[in-house]
Image (cartoon, rainbow, N blue to C red):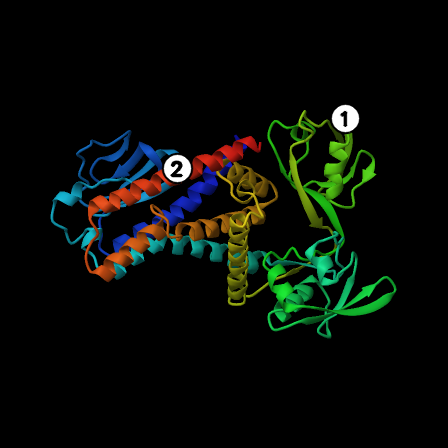
Amino acid sequence: MEYIIYFIITIGILVFVHEFGHFAAAKLSKMRVDVFAIGFGKRLFGYNKLTGFTFGDLAKDFDGQGNTDYRLSLLPLGGYVKIAGMVDESFDTKFASTEPQPYEFRAKKTLPKLFVITAGVMMNLTLTLLIFWGINFFHGKEIAKSTTITTVDKGSLAEKAGFKSFDKILSVNDVKVNDWQDVEDGIYAAGNSGNIKVTVERGEAVQSFEVSSKFLKESAQNKLFLFPYPTQAIVVTVLGNSPAEDAGLKSGDLILSLNSTEIKESTQINDIITGNQDKSIPIVLLRDKDTIRTSVKPALDGKIGISHNIAYVGEIEYRTYGFFESIPQAITKAKDFTLIFFRMMKEVFTGKIAFKDAFGGPVKIAQYAASSADSGGVSFLYFLAMLSLNLAIINILPFPVLDGGHFVIILLEGILKRELPIKLKMIIQNIGFALLLLLMAFIIYNDVISL
C-alpha cells in the first residue's frame, strides 16, 4: 500500500506538471482544450462548467462549447490534454469532416503548434531545475570533509587511472584540495582542458601521476569514478514481503556487521548471504544513532530482498548557496543527469547493460519513490527531479505518440506548408501507440520478475 501511495503521488505530480504545460500553452495560443485528464481510460469523475461535478463518463455527443472537462481517469499511468483539432492519444478524428476553426490546433501556424507540443517537456525540465535550485538554496549542499578515496576495485576505472585504495589526494594540478568538493572540481573541471597531475599521499610516501583527459571525460559522466572515505554499506531499498522486511530492515540502515563479520565493503554482503543460504544470519545495523541487532534467513533463491550501496559516513559540511548562486548549480546538476541518461542509453544499445537493468516501470518507480521518501524529504525531491528530467528527455524523443513524434510531424507540415492526411497521422499514431504498449508491457514484466 505504501508503494501504491507513493507511486500515485509521484506520477500525479509529474503528469499534472507535464499536462499543465500543454494546457497553458494551448490556452495562451487561443486553442480550445476539451479535456484535461490525469490517467487514461474510463472517466471516474470530473468537472466542467456545463455539467458541474459528475461521476462516470459524459454523454458520447457531449459538446463542452469551449469549456474544459477536468477529469480523473481509471488508469493512473499518465494523462493527456485533448486539444480541439489535433490528432492525439484519444484518436478522435470527428473534426476531420468539417472546415478548420480558428480555435483548433490544425488552424494555427507552425510556431504556436511547436510551442504547445513542447510545453509539457519544458514544464518537466522547469520542475527539475526548480527542485535542484530549491535544494541548493534552502537545504544547501553536503560536502564530504575528506580527500581520501575509498577502496579501489581491481579492473575499475579508478585503478586504470592510477589510483589505489585509500590514497589521500593532496592536490590537483598543484592546487591544494581541502574537501571532496575541491577534489571533484579539480579533477572533473581540469580534465576538460587536458591531462591532469594528481598528487597523493600513499602510505607514508607522497607520489604524483598523470591522468589523461580522455579517460576523465569518459569516467566523469557518472561521477562514480572515485568515492570519499570512510564509507559504510547502506540499505537502499527493502522489498515487501521479503526476509529483510520480516527482520525489520529499513531503507537508510547502515550495515555494520553480517554473520559476525564487520562489513567494510558492499561486495561482502552478497558473498556472506549466498554462503549461508540455509542459516539465520545475525546482522547489526545502525539506524540514526541506534544500534539494532536482528537476524535474517535468506529465501529459497538465496536472497534477502534488499538492494545496497556504499554511503559516506565521515564528517559533513553543509554549504549553502545564494538565490542567484543556486541557479548554475541546478543547471550543472541537470546537465550531469542528462549525460548519465544518454550514457546509459548508449550502453544499453551496445549491449553493455541489460535493458531490464536500465529501465523501470510502475513497480520500480513505486519502490524507489517509497525508499527515497523513507530517506527524507530531500531524497524524495531528488528522485522526483530525476524522474521529471527523464520524462522530459523520453518525451522529446522523435517517436510516434510522444511529444517528439508530434514535433517532427508539425515541423514536416511547416516545411511542406500543408497538413499531412489525417489517415496517415492515424496510422502513425496507431503504430506508435501499439509499440509503446508493447514496450510498457515488457518493462512491467521485467519489474515483476525482478521482485
Front one among 30 and 376 = 30
SS of the residue at dot 1? loop
- Residue 48, numbered label: none
Q: Where is residue 341 in the image (x, y as percent from the top left)?
A: 52, 53
Q: Which numbered disc, 2 or 1, marks the residue that appears first in the sequence?
A: 1
In the image, what residue type sits under mark 2? Leu
- Asked if the residues shown at circle 2 and circle 1 are in contact, with their CB atoms under 8 angstroms apart, the answer is no
Q: Which of 401 and 21 is in front in this view?
A: 401
Determine which of the numbered discs, if any, sits on residue 437 in the image.
2
Spot occupied by residue 279 in the image (x, y as percentages of width and height):
77, 25
* Left or right, 218 with reference to 79: right
- Judge whether residue 38 can be spotted in this image: no
Q: What residue did someone put label 1 on?
A: 280
Q: Which mark is nearer the camera, 2 or 1?
A: 2
On the rendered structure, is 19 left or right of 327?
Answer: left
Q: Position of residue 187 (x, y in %)?
A: 66, 66
- At a point 69% along the width and 65% down the height, the residue shown is 183
Give coordinates of residue 104: x percent, y percent.
19, 51
Taking the spot 31% from the left edge, 58% from the top edge, the residue there is 115
Q: What residue type is labelled 1?
A: Ser
